[in-house]
Amino acid sequence: MEMRVVVPDATMLLSLADQLSVALGSDRISIPSDRPEVEVHVEQGSDWRVLRVLHTVEWWRNHAGIESVEMWLGERSCVLGRRALVETWH
């Protein structure tokens, strides 16, 4: 199974790939030459690796000051973004 992280700022591509390599091993990480994204190869049913990718991307995004990133798990996608405070009504 493949996870993909679309990087909105191509200059940050290598820093994300480096973080994911540290978290999962460089043999699981690749960078396509034609798209600004990082691909992560995970085995089917490897939930802990999926969670580690999510955690690593979220940490990287916060430290890099990137507002949001698009992530794909197979054919499904989601956007990880900054949390916003929600006003409560009393």
Image: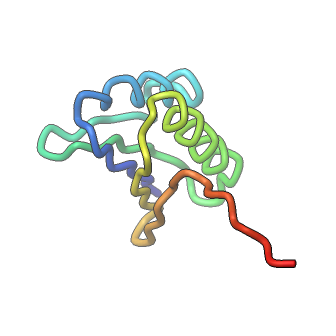
Front residue of 10/45: it is: 10
Count of numbered labels shown in the rendering:
0
Answer left or right for 30 relative to 73.
left
Q: Is the residue 71 above or below the residue 76 in the image?
A: above
Residue 84 image offset from top left, x and y in percent:
61, 57
Horizontal and vertical percent for residue 3?
44, 53
Q: On the image, which quarter does residue 17 sit in?
A: top left
Q: Is residue 65 left or right of residue 8?
A: right
The way the protein has been coloured in the rendering is rainbow
Measured from the top left, where is residue 26 in percent x and y? 45, 24
21 and 43: which is toward the camera:
21
List the single residue furthest toward the bottom: 90
The image shows residue 47 at horizontal and vertical percentages of 68, 54
Q: Residue at x 27, y 36 (%)?
A: 31
Furthest-right residue in this view: 90
Task: Find the residue positioned furthest to the front.
Answer: 90
Q: Which quadrant of the figure has residue 16?
A: top left
The C terminus appears in which quarter of the rendering?
Answer: bottom right
- Of 31 and 87, nearer the camera is 87
Which residue appears at 61% of the width and 54% of the height? 83
Q: Residue at x 24, y 28 (%)?
A: 11
Side of 2 relative to 57 (left or right): left
Which residue is located at x 66 percent, y 48 percent? Answer: 51
In the rendered image, the vertical position of residue 76 relative to residue 15, given as above or below: below
